Image (cartoon, helix red, strand yellow):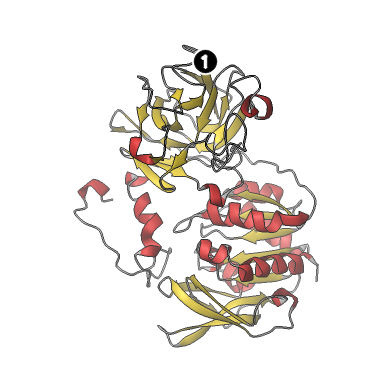
Amino acid sequence: TIRVSNIKSRSSSGRSLMPEGFEQLGAEGMRDMLTYLCADESRFRILDLSKAFTANNSRGLFITPDNREDTIAFRKYGLLKADDVPFDVISPDKAVANVIVLKGGDSRSWSRQNLPQSVEIPVGIAAAQLHFLGGVAGWGHPLNPDADAAKVTIQFAGGAKEIIMLKNGREFADYNGRADVPGSKMLESWIRGRGQIRWFSKPVSNPAVIEKLTIESFNNGVAPVFFAVTADTEKSGAKVEIPVAKPAARIFEWGTGIKTLVVGGGSSHDFNRFFNLADKKTLEEGGFASVNYTENFTDMAANMKAADVLQYNTNKEITDPAEKRSILDHLAAGKGMVIVHAGAWYNQKGWLEFNTEIIGGGSRGHDRLGEFEVKVTDAAHPVMKGVPASFSLVDELYYLEPEPKSTPIQVLAEAHSATKNKTYPSVYVVKHPKARIVVITLGHDARAHDLDAYKTLLKNAISWVKVKN
């Protein structure tokens, strides 16, 4: 392993970051991965706060959501570094909620009357310390001197707990202004307009796997704010051996609409932002679907029986036989599956049948991220209803090749690669003997997920595969 600090210079090689092939990928496509390289040797784990967020910073956070001045606005969003620590700051345009604000503040305020007092954050690894991006509050220091701001409860596998108490005037200061406190650091260049954002770190003494964090306010005059949390395997400059355990499976609750289990995670893509937040918004609009998202195969296996459709986007390898079996049982029961973008790669080195029997082939490479045209070849198929006869987008054109002895496919749309001078399937149906399966190779980033043609394709595919053969 080469430490990032020992790399003299870096530049795009124009090659893919997918698990195999390492074909063409431009500098723009390397953006997210280069940011991750700042986290040396997998030292950091950015925690998923998507289900803990309570507010959106494009609106007011404290007195009333209608007061858009009453917020904390960042100069930019995405993966940002404070010293050596990466934080994922979610854009307000990409999520219904992107910040944790907990109950507190003036007794008449929106934050005191409407927000929850506690939230939970799944973890699933051990850590030597935790880094928090927040450290500010509504009605924070110098107001409400020495008040408790928040309590963080670390729940470990096996039942042990560790408590971190956070104080107003120590870790927390008021968001509006530049009041300083000794227990956190201001990130002056991160904020647009008035106000501030801060960060701080707290050690973790127990070496066991952390199952979850619970963050609570005290329903007092302080309304604490958290934008991101990052787990760290190192403490005081020394590398700590960190055991990684499978998190306990969560059992999801379902609402109305098509019960859609979305599985993401892996490399080279912002799975949470696009396959969770963006696709979930598309699918849940108007009650079309009830969506639960996970990046853990344990969750997938535990919730498959309750789901109508599996939307599979991950490029991680499945190694557990029970998790493989959950997919096979889902299909054997005649339930549908939609495989999107990174899920259509040759990811399963120890399970080749996934590609030959379920995907009907796979991709080992793609064009450089850029604009290309998709042409519909079977407009009569229900999956293509309402999709333009042709449309252009900026994406990765996958070199998806059907396997000669695999399950047959029916191509519904295709794209021509000028690089390879060859046409490849963009959307197709796998003629599985028991279940309906659709593969959509599009979907690298927002330029696909925000496109009306993509949204229509995704909803049509989910609707069509739900019907048993």
Relative image position of residue 248 (x, y in whole percent): 61, 38
Q: Residue at x 76, y 63 (%)?
A: 335
- Residue projecting furthest to the left: 8
Number of labelled discs? 1
In the rendered image, is residue 364 in sight? yes
Which residue type does callout 1 highlight?
Asp
Residue designated by label 1: 148
Q: Is residue 133 above or below residue 360?
A: above
Q: Residue at x 51, y 19 (%)?
A: 149
In the rendered image, is residue 348 in sight? no
Q: Is residue 1 above or below residue 432?
A: above
Judging depth in this view, the residue of 71 and 410 nearest the camera is 71
Taking 367 as reference, is 362 left or right?
right
Q: Residue at x 70, y 48 (%)?
A: 303
Indicate the secondary structure of the residue bearing disc 1: strand
Judging depth in this view, the residue of 124 and 105 nearest the camera is 105
Relative image position of residue 344 (x, y in whole percent): 55, 68
Q: Quadrant of the C terminus?
A: bottom right
Relative image position of residue 121 (x, y in whole percent): 57, 35
Relative image position of residue 309 (x, y in whole percent): 72, 60
Taking 77 as reference, is 220 left or right?
right
Taking 449 as reference, is 10 left or right?
left
